[in-house]
Amino acid sequence: MSIVTKPRPPIAFGLAAAALTVAVPAFAAPVQGSGVAWDIVEGLTTEIGPRPAGSSAEDRARDWGAQKLKSLGFQKVAVEEFKTRAWTRGPESAALTAPYAQPLAITALGFSVPTPKGGLKAQLVYFPTLAALEAAPDGSLKGKVAFIDHAMRAAQDGSGYGPYGNVRRQGPTIASRKGAAGVVIRSAGTDSHRNPHTGVTTFARDVTPIPSGAVSNPDADLIARTAARGKPMAIDLTLMGKPFPDATSGNVVAELPGRDPSLPIIVVACHLDSWDLGTGAVDDASGCAIVTAAALAASKDGQTLRTIRVLWSGNEEMGLSGGGGEHYVRLHGSEPHAMAMESDFGADKVWQLKFNTAPADKAMADKVKAALWPMGIVPHEGAADGGEDVSAIIKAQNLAVIDLGQDGMHYFDLHHTPDDTLDKVDPLALQQNVDAWAAVLKVVANEAGPIGKATAKAE
Amino acid sequence: MSIVTKPRPPIAFGLAAAALTVAVPAFAAPVQGSGVAWDIVEGLTTEIGPRPAGSSAEDRARDWGAQKLKSLGFQKVAVEEFKTRAWTRGPESAALTAPYAQPLAITALGFSVPTPKGGLKAQLVYFPTLAALEAAPDGSLKGKVAFIDHAMRAAQDGSGYGPYGNVRRQGPTIASRKGAAGVVIRSAGTDSHRNPHTGVTTFARDVTPIPSGAVSNPDADLIARTAARGKPMAIDLTLMGKPFPDATSGNVVAELPGRDPSLPIIVVACHLDSWDLGTGAVDDASGCAIVTAAALAASKDGQTLRTIRVLWSGNEEMGLSGGGGEHYVRLHGSEPHAMAMESDFGADKVWQLKFNTAPADKAMADKVKAALWPMGIVPHEGAADGGEDVSAIIKAQNLAVIDLGQDGMHYFDLHHTPDDTLDKVDPLALQQNVDAWAAVLKVVANEAGPIGKATAKAE
């Protein structure tokens, strides 16, 4: 609709305007939070913004982070750089050209290779599932672009991202193996906006990397409806992103020293890099904010017994086997650790709790459960596993882990999209995370007895 | 987060895949509706897509519409073309360059003029309101870009679009008058996605048109937060859209003849054109779907007494004083009309009812109220005014009007954005619109006595 779009002479506000400029607030500012965690998310998203691995923005974010951690009273603040393979986005666009002309909202997947100059014009072949693509005869997609659909739905524990995320992780390799010249997937996301979800893909060694992109859910719906009409489809695809081999990333590491420096430490992690499309508010400035604010809160009334170390990891998103978690082990793998935990699932409230602790540490686990019980956080079956930023140190030392599971119902609305921005962070939910993490750290960082190795073997 | 993004060998599905391809549905199709109204929205959005005024897509949409109306049994189906001024989008991008480097999600406003080659690099000056901009001294913005913020909120009756939409309608003229080289506004929208809202602006005759764009709400939040830090801001702005003077648009008109062709007719309208960013599902394929399906439903059990004419108007969005509503009057202004109604506020349920009918027609109005009462639709104070597509004929003949007000709480999440797509249309809500409109048409198109002129004078 276009209510009152008729040209009207601009109103001469005159005196009324002068009065108004006094009466109105200086800034029509959105809802704001406060406190350490909010300041970190607000600062990183406002003063740095997107910080893809290997970029100058990620470098600025390291400096910003080191400065922030020092100002908060952390000690042994260190920037620990490393070389990594990375990827950079280029111009990208796509359109259905047959049977109907329709622009498509598309974005390249990380480690996609570029389309030919002038774009890739090809038949588009619809596959409802990854399994259907896998079942296509070898060579049957020669010169064509495969479209892979799927049915990811929101889940509180984020469990859809495992199986449906495989469309992004495995689809390009499978399509290439069938001879495809390119691949387009339905975004691994649960929203209904024209903002496709990027994310890293990978190519098996025996296949040729091909241009690989994701369209938004509404665009995937359009392709599905078009395919259902049974007429041949064609696409014009431009994805100019490409890998670059020798990028610099880095971790920021800092400590709140414990009263007994001889005891194995507790490491709490997040990642500092983000995808380029948004500003990495929920993925994962919030994680850094939560673990940092919680470490401070846990030691607010005096040093904890054990040292708490925070790790703001570099290049989690494109890290594969060369990210910040691995670099942390290279530098710190021989130092005694007692436990590792990670926050990397947004900023919504913690609702579930999982352990991978030794049976001998049941009393400690019970204390953690009791501390979280009043906050509505319920223990769940299944082993805790940390996440990308701590998986290497967990594996190296077979560390005990506690996972604080956040509500993921809306996480995959935002994940890896332009919509990952500060306004999506609820300051009260963020603070609930800090409170929950602080409660856990007060227990584990003050545990006097030995903390045993993990029960379940890390994968 | 990046759960399980480690490279894993693609799974060889083998036999399981073959089994799966039988078990899975052929298409992972989204929720679908059915019936005449759904078919129109689905068809226009799938087979035509974006159809900006004056484009070849709008032309295809006219052919599509004429064909559809004929197939539904409408008579005197006519495409009535006219020349109009229009506007076409070009490449567009923007970034804050100081004090922090941040890409901005931006889109040009209709009738923006292009930025200089290489982009417009300028200081960005923050104004919290249109009134604050108006209060700036003349010439004070010379060579600068004005940013205009505002505080539009969602409202069920869409009432925020009047005052806050003025930032888009009047802001560019006011900024130009102050000497600005360009203007950027917070989108006139209520969502939190990185999809800015376009829409037409207009320049007063005495000012130089300037490049004019809108950023998304999260980007406007970022600008507001940055401005609050007090450091000078700079922008790099590229908006290459430009007007073109001699475009072809057109209306599609069709009738369901009444039993008494001598009686003044009922005209029900919508608009066929859409903004280019989305596929015009809620603005306004839904309106065309609703009025068309309702006209058919009202005459399902036999011809109505009066002829019902549907008008699918061309160039509503950029029409200003030269759109389809005016062309309708040029061709049909001398034909006797009894009443005009329009649907152009999305596809959510009708909740309120307004009249601009003669006091002598109270019995007819009471019948309309009674028919809608069981559907949860409540009469409201305030005169009905139709909308852009019928305002010219209403004014020309001082026609009676009934407005069926749709729930607008989410309309300005989608309006003029890429997100205006089919998935936003709830088939049940769409059908409620059809049922409500059909109920009204059964009353007014079967009104035997004279239908009086409007009570309140049309603006």
Image (spheres, coloured by chain):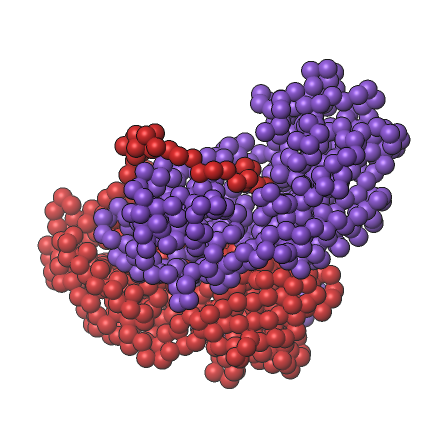
Chain colours: A red, B purple
Left or right of residue A152, residue A304 in this image:
left
Q: Residue furthest front?
A: B206
Q: Nearer the viewer, residue A132 or A114?
A: A114
Instruction: State which quarter of the image contains the N terminus of chain B.
Output: bottom left
Percent position of residue B133, x then y: 34, 41
Left or right of residue B134, residue B409 in this image:
right
The answer to whether any part of residue A118 appears in the image is yes
Q: Residue at x 53, y 72 (%)?
A: A238
A198, above or below A26, in the image = below
Q: Nearer the viewer, residue A419 or B362?
A: B362
Q: Residue furthest bottom?
A: A206
Left or right of residue B154, residue A289 in this image:
left
Q: How many marks?
A: 0
Percent position of residue A171, x then y: 55, 71
Percent position of residue A384, x then y: 37, 57
Instruction: State which quarter of the image contains the C terminus of chain B.
Output: top right
A357, above or below A440, in the image = below
Left or right of residue B189, residue B63 in this image:
right
Q: Residue at x 66, y 31 (%)?
A: B395
B312, above or below A139, in the image = above
Q: Nearer the viewer, residue B328 or A150?
A: B328
Percent position of residue A281, x then y: 35, 54
The answer to whether any part of residue A427 appears in the image is no
Q: Residue at x 35, y 46 (%)?
A: B178
Q: Nearer the viewer, residue A8 or B213?
A: A8
Where, by quadrant of the figure, is residue B350 drawn? top right
Q: Residue at x 47, y 56 (%)?
A: B113
